[in-house]
Image (cartoon, grey):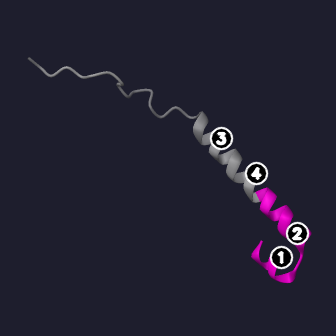
Amino acid sequence: MLAAIKAGDVERADRLARDHTRQFRDSFIDFMKENYATDMALGQTHAAE
């Protein structure tokens, strides 16, 4: 992308920026779809009496 900007190739720089943004968005959405907290207790834990 930087090479395209330095070369003044606006169309290529724009395409690369758009592709990069899509890749980031897709990766972020995939990450958010995962459930890493399935075994995590969300309530208060009771101490042994």
Q: Residue drawn 74% across and 59% down?
A: 20
Q: Residue drawn 19% across and 20% down?
A: 46
Disc 2 packing (10 Å; few <14; some 14–19; many ≥20): some
User: Does residue 14 appear left or right of residue 43 in this picture?
Assistant: right
Amino acid at pointer 3: Ile
Residue 22, numbered circle:
4
Residue 31: quadrant of the picture: top right
Of the numbered discs 4 and 1, the one sitting upstream in the chain is 1
Instruction: State the CA–CA distance, disc 2 to disc 1.
Output: 6 Å
Location of mark 2 (residue): 12
Q: Is residue 7 above or below residue 39?
A: below
Label 3 element class: helix
Q: Which residues are magenta?
A: 1-19
Question: Percent position (x, y) of residue 38?
Answer: 45, 27
Location of mark 1 (residue): 4
In the rendered structure, are the residues bearing label 2 and label 1 in contact, judged by CB atoms less than 8 Å apart?
yes
Instruction: State the CA–CA distance, disc 4 to disc 1.
Output: 18 Å
Residue 29, numbered circle:
3
**Secondary structure predominantly adopted by residues drawn in magenta:** helix
Of the numbered discs 4 and 3, the one sitting upstream in the chain is 4
Amino acid at pointer 2: Arg
Of the numbered discs 2 and 1, the one sitting upstream in the chain is 1
In the rendered structure, are the residues bearing label 2 and label 4 in contact, judged by CB atoms less than 8 Å apart?
no
Residue 40: quadrant of the picture: top left
Question: Percent position (x, y) of residue 14?
Answer: 85, 64
Label 4 element class: helix
Of the numbered discs 2 and 4, the one sitting upstream in the chain is 2
In the rendered structure, are the residues bearing label 1 and label 3 in contact, judged by CB atoms less than 8 Å apart?
no
Disc 1 packing (10 Å; few <14; some 14–19; many ≥20): some
| Quadrant holding the N terminus | bottom right
Amino acid at pointer 4: Arg
In the rendered structure, are the residues bearing label 3 and label 2 in contact, judged by CB atoms less than 8 Å apart?
no
